[in-house]
Image (cartoon, helix red, strand yellow):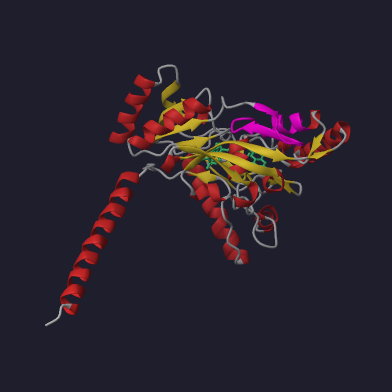
């Protein structure tokens, strides 16, 4: 992709200290341990460096794929001609400016965030302590567990809004949070950090709740095998795992990808899974569950399509708007010329 190659050259020249890896295999990063190389993998050291990377991509008509801990994503074996921006070095974590709040940058792990809250006697993030993702990924998909979700605790989110190349703070109530969704999925932006509003409580009591939730998690989930968490979202009025189990699909295997024997909601990598195995496995499960129950399961894991390109078509969109305005101006001029002809005294 020409724009991407130009952006890579400009980024190398103008941000020489950036950790920029070319042709980086995604299987080294993804919790499912599959996936070929992306053309470039940038790991900015701070928010400023990240903004600069996004600027050069934008100027060349390219959108990045921003990723956190890669615990919810699967990449094709053939690789993708895209640039990933990893937030793994955006790890600032501190008490917020207002009472009972915490500010965390996008790359902070949810486990660290929950522990920090506990150590500061702040309750509300216990549910997140066993989710292996980052603040950015957790906010983007409104991660949740054991009755809690990000929506309950996010006071505001700091985003880098690509069209204006500016940092903007979005109030929690404006984030469009729904079950495993947020408005950020549809907006051309990167989540840079978030402020969490919590409730004071005894650190020991908070710790005990975290321990209890994590014991439940260990007992029920296949944490000893590579996975990307729940393969499907919860359908209305039920649980994906229960449906899959009821349809006799526990242990169903395609190549190295398998519906976990321990928890039917998880797809696991038994060792040699490929992207195609995962796609075929999940496709089979969806079709079989639909055939037996007429319920359509929606994937929770993000499976990036082969050949995916991420284009930032702002130039074309801007030109379309300008063309539209010029056309409108011409039309207005023609209309008023016709009008003045009509009113001229004969
Ligand atoms: C064993 C296991 C257990 C899990 N348990 C749970 C659970 O209980 N509850 C739950 O909700 N999830 C669970 N998950 C799934 C996953 O951990 C969460 O969805 C997590 O929030 C994803 O965060 P991440 O940093 O890994 O995101 P990634 O996988 O890196 O990215 C996921 C999506 O978020 C986007 N994204 C990431 N960071 C940013 C950013 N800074 N700005 C903009 N977009 C961004 C990516 O582009 C992508 O679309 C589990 C996963 C595993 C492997």
Residue drawn at (18%, 79%), measured in percent from left and top? 342
* Quarter placement of the N terminus: top left
Residue 334: x %, y % from top left: 19, 67
> In screen coordinates, is 132 left or right of 121?
left
Closer-to-camera residue (62/154): 154
> In screen coordinates, is 143 left or right of 49?
right
Q: Is residue 267 above or below residue 67?
A: below
- Ligand 1 position by quadrant: top right
Closer-to-camera residue (8/92): 92
Q: Which residues are magenta?
A: 93-117
Q: Is residue 110 magenta?
A: yes
Residue drawn at (56%, 51%), measured in percent from left and top? 299
* Quarter placement of the C terminus: bottom left
Residue drawn at (41%, 21%), measured in percent from left and top? 15
Which residue, as the protein is rendered here, is positioned at the far bottom? 346
Closer-to-camera residue (294/62): 62
Residue 46: x %, y % from top left: 53, 24
> In screen coordinates, is 308 left or right of 222?
left
């Amino acid at each position: 992709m020409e724009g991407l190659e130009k952006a890579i050259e400009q980024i190398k020249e103008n941000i020489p200290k950036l950790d920029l890896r070319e042709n980086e295999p995604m299987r080294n990063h993804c919790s499912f341990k599959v996936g070929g190389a992306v053309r470039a993998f940038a790991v900015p050291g701070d928010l400023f460096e990240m903004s600069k990377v996004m600027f050069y991509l934008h100027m060349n008509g390219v959108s990045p794929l921003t990723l956190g801990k890669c615990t919810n994503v699967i990449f094709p074996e053939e690789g993708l001609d895209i640039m990933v921006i990893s937030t793994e070095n955006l790890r600032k974590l501190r008490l917020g400016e207002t009472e009972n709040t915490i500010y965390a940058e996008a790359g902070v792990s949810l486990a660290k965030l929950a522990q920090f809250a506990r150590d500061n006697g702040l309750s509300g993030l216990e549910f997140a302590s066993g989710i292996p993702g980052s603040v950015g990924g957790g906010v983007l998909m409104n991660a949740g567990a054991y009755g809690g979700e990000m929506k309950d605790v996010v006071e505001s989110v700091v985003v880098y809004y690509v069209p204006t190349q500016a940092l903007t703070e979005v109030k929690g109530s404006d984030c469009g949070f729904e079950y495993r969704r947020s408005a950020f999925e549809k907006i051309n932006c990167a989540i840079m950090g978030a402020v969490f509003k919590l409730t004071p409580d005894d650190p020991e009591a908070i710790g005990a709740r975290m321990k209890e939730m994590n014991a439940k998690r260990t007992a029920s989930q296949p944490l000893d095998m590579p996975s990307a968490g729940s393969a499907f979202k919860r359908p209305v009025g039920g649980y994906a795992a229960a449906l899959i189990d009821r349809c006799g699909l526990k242990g169903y295997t395609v190549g190295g990808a398998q519906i976990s024997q321990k928890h039917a909601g998880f797809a696991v990598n038994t060792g040699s899974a490929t992207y195609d195995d995962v796609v075929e496995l999940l496709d089979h499960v969806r079709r079989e569950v639909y055939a037996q129950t007429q319920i359509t399961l929606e994937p929770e894991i993000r499976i990036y399509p082969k050949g995916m390109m991420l284009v930032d078509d702002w130039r074309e969109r801007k030109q379309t708007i300008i063309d539209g305005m010029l056309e409108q101006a011409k039309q207005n001029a023609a209309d008023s010329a016709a009008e003045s002809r009509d009113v001229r005294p004969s």
